[in-house]
Image (cartoon, grey):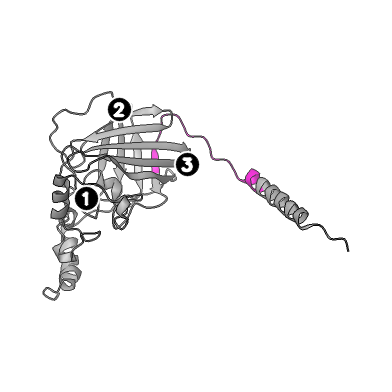
Amino acid sequence: MKKFPEFAISAMALIAAWTFSAVASAQQPKAAPPPRHDISGIWDPANRGIQGRGAQAMPADDKPEHKLAFTPLGLQMFMRNKPGTGPTEVPEAEVNDPVHMCDPQGFPRENLFELRTTQIIQTPVQVVVLYEYDKVWRVIWTDGRELPKDPEPRWYGYSVGKWKDDTTFVVQTSGTDDRTWLDNAGRPHSSDLRVEEQFHRVDHDTLELTVMIDDPKVYTKPWVALDKLRFDLQPSNFDVREMICSPSETAEYNRKHAIPAAGGSKAR
């Protein structure tokens, strides 16, 4: 029997593999193009932002080259916080995370922790973002107004947005209440915090969210907290469940779990 040289067999294998790949690609339906100036819909994170240390793409604390560079004031603020996870974590009963008292987690933490199904509604002058967690909403003004110069602090700040191009919506937020944390690891921010969000509609069924943190009082340089977190479009009849912080349920959890775990009095 006549044998083919090894290089000929390899070449034929490559050609066959390429042909199969091309046919398979041709059979896959192409994603519909994104609509112009439209990010409305019910969106579910493909990789949920429910992370112990914060959201996807948050700098890793176990890698020195990735650690955030705090200013002296920022480091003091960070060390005052006592989170239940991260490099400065404490026992559950000692945590001073405001969220544990059912304070609003605020913005941008709403994007950086417990980021679940999110509905976006557009009007001629606003983009409204409805969050599943804590059942809260944000209003992003698109009527051309500027951010307030000396704002009264708000849990979710003041937001204005405009279209960078046909598929990218850019939002600037300031005036956030500095009692809130950025994430579960206790990363702080000051009242000078400026947050930039970029919502990019990749195609009809895909949205990407990028979040940039800029707070010169706390961090020595701006940093990316979310890098193109992907959302998948859900059917228009999708029913978003509610998730609401209940002080009575929090107290019951502490009685049954947190206090006993910390060596306190036993639950009755």
Q: Which residues are magenta?
A: 24-42
The residue located at (69%, 52%) in the rendering is 17
Image quarter in which the N terminus is found: bottom right
Q: Earlier in the sequence, mark 1 or mark 2?
A: 2
Above or below: residue 170 compared with residue 62 = above
Amino acid at dot 3:
Asp
Looking at the rendered structure, the secondary structure element under dot 2 is: loop
Disc 2: CA contacts within 10 A as few (<14), some (14-19) or many (>=20): some
Give the residue at mark 1: 187
Please tell me whether mark 1 or mark 2 is closer to you in this view.
1
Q: Residue 60, image x and y in percent?
A: 32, 54
Q: Earlier in the sequence, mark 2 or mark 3?
A: 2
Looking at the rendered structure, the secondary structure element under dot 3 is: loop
Residue 39 in magenta stretch? yes
Above or below: residue 231 compared with residue 143 = below
Q: Which mark is residue 205?
A: 3
The quadrant holding residue 130 is top left
Q: Which mark is residue 94?
A: none
Depth check, front residue: 250 or 51? 51
Disc 3: CA contacts within 10 A as few (<14), some (14-19) or many (>=20): some
Give the residue at mark 2: 142
Disc 1: CA contacts within 10 A as few (<14), some (14-19) or many (>=20): many
Quick check: 53 left or right of 90? right
Residue 139 visible from this viewpoint: yes
Q: Residue 118, image x and y in percent?
A: 34, 45
Quick check: 138 left or right of 48? left
The residue located at (37%, 44%) in the rendering is 227
The residue located at (74%, 51%) in the rendering is 11
